Amino acid sequence: FLASNSVYSVVEKLIFLSLYYYIINIITVKILTFNFFSQNYKDVAVLDYRAPSLAANSISTHFSGDREAAVVLDVACGTGLVAQQMKRHGFGHFVGIEGSQAMLEVARESGLYQDLKQCMLGEGQLPVQWGLFDVVVFVGALSVGQVPVDVVKEYCKSTKPGGYICMTTRSNHDNLQYKASLERELKQMEEEELWTCVESSQVEDWERAVSEQEHGYISGAVYIYKTL
């Protein structure tokens, strides 16, 4: 394509190729990282990773419909930690989206999901139908270096009117700028009357700190919105 297009200068072609391979490398690193964690995901127990149970508890508090019949979209479902927790609260119909094929295989083996789809979030069209889901959950994916904040609006469209969207993010120092951007996006969507906030909770003991700059536990946040 580049060779046949005389409009591009040599410099422009080199810039184009550099950007192309930079993006490909980022995607490749993400996939390799997620595939690695699919084989070591039980190690999150060492971190005392509480986001899946906290999200499931919050959803259970607010959802008053038929849980067994409710269709739940688990975004960046990983190996199925959130579905496991929601199953304990009576939910039984799950659709999962995940970028890592290896993680999808683990999720499939769990037997919790009626449908699983592979998709790198923010890098293509949504592989789900709009207005289909009673509950959409984003747990563990909304943080710096993972998913752009604007994907939230896309997945809001996949929720039924009156449905719930649950999101979590970390509140440690490295993620504060992303968290602020996320909260601006959530507020903007509320001002656009796409949804209304029903819960915004700050949790001190979110997970064990792993960086040298942090000790003990880092904090996090749970957000629940109801679509209009």
Image: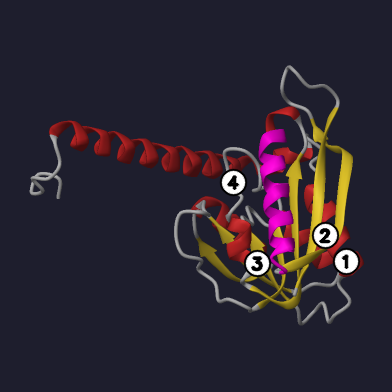
Q: Quadrant of the C terminus?
A: bottom right
Above or below — where is 176 with respect to 228?
above
- Disc nearer the start of the sequence (3/4): 4
Q: Secondary structure at mark 3?
A: helix
Instruction: Return the residue at label 2.
Output: 56
Residue 156 got which mark? Answer: 3
**Residue found 31% across the figure and 41% down from its top:** 20
Query: Disc 3 residue type?
Result: Cys
Q: Toward the viewer: 204 or 77? A: 204
**Residue found 26% across the figure and 39% down from its top:** 16
Q: Position of residue 177 (x, y in %)?
A: 68, 35
Cα distance, mark 1 to mark 4?
Answer: 27 Å
Q: Secondary structure at mark 4?
A: helix
Query: Disc 1 residue type?
Result: Ser
Residue 37 got which mark? Answer: none
- Disc nearer the start of the sequence (1/4): 4
Characterize the magenta stretch by its predominant secondary structure: helix
Q: Secondary structure at mark 2?
A: helix
Instruction: Return the residue at label 1.
Output: 60
Q: Are marks 1 and 2 in contact (CB under 8 Å)?
A: yes
- Disc nearer the start of the sequence (4/2): 4
Residue 38 got which mark? Answer: 4
